[in-house]
Amino acid sequence: MSKKFCRSFLFICFAVNFVFAQKNKPELYFPAANNWLTKSPVELGLNPAKIQETINFAKENEVKNPRNMEVSHYQSFGKEPFGVAIGPFADRGEPTGLIIYKGYIVASWGEPARCDITHSVTKSFLSSVVGLAVDRGLIRSVQDTVAAYIPPIELYEQPISRSADDFGKPEMLRLFDTPHNKTITWDAMLRQTSDWEGTLWGKPDWADRPDKDATQWLNRARNKQGSVYEYNDVRVNALSLAALSVWRKPLPQVLKENIMDKIGASNTWRWTGYRNSWIVLDGQNVQSVSGGGHWGGGMFINAYDMGRFGLLSLNKGRWKDQQILSENWVNQALTPTPAQPTYGYMNWFLNTNKKLLPSASANVFYHLGNGTNMIYVDPDHELVMVVRWLATDAMDGVVKRALEAFNK
């Protein structure tokens, strides 16, 4: 028998086995609206004792912050300059979570149907509506400067008669009109590397997590856009207002119609802004929503809806047979930010250095917000976890125990 024939025969055998394996590989399950199937860990080949250990650990390591979120705010961000709350708060619930494997719920705890503030997980929804704008050509390229897309913005409820002190001063809000802001791209805003300068909704950019050196607050030189990473909610809110200008409709409506309804999310989530974040858009008063709960507001959502978004992320923007977010956009969101290799687009955190989650692979990513609120996405294990109100230093402990459930 010739070597050539042997190689051909082996190749055919490999190809047949590969096709057979693909045909018999169980497909990822996508839950229908109002109907999410549950399977026991045993049914899916997981270790039930380790799943229970994961739940117990999550419950035992509840974050120490008060459950009254307004009190919690004034014990933390409320101490910053201009830290007064301007958006709504609501008391949070019990430590809560879901473990989702191959699309099925294998475990839940706490109050998964309760709508709680999810803090900066909101940013992942914000970046997704920007992604939709890119996918549809409303934004031609993330490398375009934002200034080219944003006209002067009229604030709502301005006085009919302006005082003499305001005579001759600009009446319209120009988000990207300074020499530095004119250089900022959509990509830099998404990666939190813009160093956008200004004040929005009464919050100066420097007042969010302010420099310990107060001499730097007003007079420091600006970093070239794209060069320095700084997590900053004022700049996130500037991106939200820019996205509102591009879509010309409220971002919660964009999210609902184009993502949440399509993945079967409930009708209970709410995306809120601030009491002063209203503009006039096409003759109507419209609220510009916030990218988190730093001063109140942001997304109030239950764990089930967070889990559905996690499944969408796991499957690279596809839900059943529909590509909701382009795979190209998800890949961009998962590309490390040069100035911060553990960050992609807001708020897609990467496990590239395995510092925060050493028990997980570098292939893992997660949507993360204060609280801790986490949507953990593990492509290697087809695993999604929603974990809410967990101490930050316990995040890896939850992940470690969940992954041990795969060891039969």
Image (cartoon, rainbow, N blue to C red):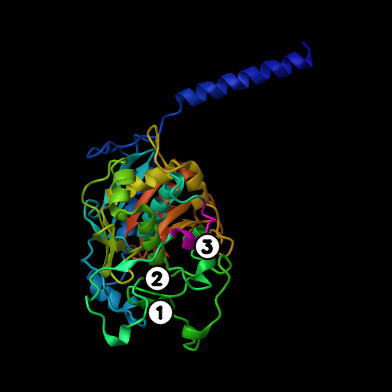
Circle 2 residue: 234
- Residue at 34%, 64% (x, y): give it: 292
> Height in image: 106 above or below 218?
above
> Height in image: 105 above or below 247?
above
Q: Is residue 194 visible?
A: no
SS label for mark 2: helix
Query: Which class describes the residues within 10 Å of circle 3: few (<14), some (14-19), or many (20+)?
Result: few
SS label for mark 1: helix
Query: What whole-number distance in Å separates the C-alpha atoms at marks 1 and 2?
Result: 9 Å
**Residue extent of the magenta highlight:** 141-149
Is residue 256 toward the left or the right of residue 225 in the image? left
Callouts 3 and 2 close, C-beta under 8 Å: no
User: Mark 1 or mark 3: which comes first in sequence?
Assistant: 1
User: Mark 3 or mark 2: which comes first in sequence?
Assistant: 2
Residue 176 % position (x, y): 46, 68
SS label for mark 3: loop
Circle 1 residue: 207
Callouts 1 and 2 close, C-beta under 8 Å: yes
Which amino acid lies under the numbered mark 1 shown in the image of this protein? Ala
Can you tell which of label 1 and label 3 is closer to the viewer? Answer: 1
- Mark number, residue 355: 3
Q: In the rendered image, which quarter contains the N terminus?
A: top right
Which amino acid lies under the numbered mark 2 shown in the image of this protein? Val
> Height in image: 44 above or below 73?
above
